[in-house]
Image: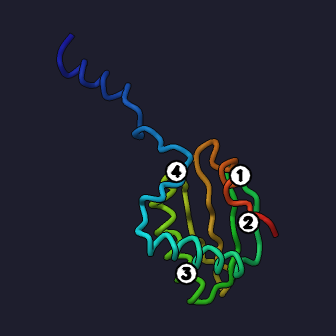
Amino acid sequence: MNKLLVFAMMLTSLPLFAKDSPFACNLSAFSAQERTRHFDELGPALRRLRTGVRELPDGYAFQFPSDAKTFALLAEWIEQERRCCPFFDISLQVEREGGPLWMKVSGRPGTKAFIEAEAKSWIKQ
């Protein structure tokens, strides 16, 4: 068998992604100040601002007002959350004509169950 064919066979057998991270928050991704900001300030503030929750097949979507301050808080929270929970897919949708903001938190199988177990305060209406 020629070397090129062997190499091509090896490439096709490699997984598309590296090993998936575990379903656990990596709190060491934060400094003490960032941890306080994320869990004691941003999270509670965003939960108070949340105006709706939509269940999705693979996670949840959270509705927020479309003002600039809420947008900035969401952007800050998302940047931090992606570091401590890299298994989440997080997107922020800005609806047209001044409609609400939607933050979608989803991911691979098991993500929705993780959200339901570890982030109940985000889900309850």
Q: Mark 1 points at which residue?
A: 117
Crowding near the residue tagged with mark 4, few <14, some 14–19, many ≥20 C-alpha atoms within 10 Å: many
Tell me the tag on residue 87: 4
Q: Give the percent coordinates (x, y) of residue 86.
A: 48, 54
Crowding near the residue tagged with mark 3, few <14, some 14–19, many ≥20 C-alpha atoms within 10 Å: some
Q: Give the percent coordinates (x, y) of residue 112.
A: 68, 50
The N terminus, quarter of image: top left
In front here: 1 or 54? 54
**Which quarter of the figure has residue 4?**
top left
Colouring used for the render: rainbow
User: Upstream in the sequence, badge 3 or badge 2?
Assistant: 3
Camera-side mark, 2 or 4: 2
Q: Distance between the residues labelled 1 and 2?
A: 10 Å
Q: Is residue 70 left or right of residue 1?
A: right
Q: Report the residue that reaches farthest toward the top.
A: 1
Q: Mark 2 points at which residue?
A: 121
Q: Label 2 is placed on what type of residue? A: Ser
Image: 6 above or below 83: above
Camera-side mark, 1 or 4: 1
**Which quarter of the figure has residue 106?**
bottom right
Crowding near the residue tagged with mark 2, few <14, some 14–19, many ≥20 C-alpha atoms within 10 Å: few
Q: Give the percent coordinates (x, y) of residue 89.
A: 54, 56
| SS at mark 1 in the image | helix
Q: Is residue 96 left or right of residue 27?
A: right
Q: How far apart are marks 3 and 4 (CA)?
A: 21 Å
Q: Mark 3 points at which residue?
A: 73
Q: Report the residue that reaches farthest toward the left.
A: 3
Q: Which residue occupies 70% across, 81% down?
A: 49
Q: How far apart are marks 1 and 3 (CA)?
A: 24 Å
Q: Label 1 is placed on what type of residue? A: Ala
Q: How far apart are marks 2 and 4 (CA)?
A: 20 Å
In front here: 80 or 92? 80
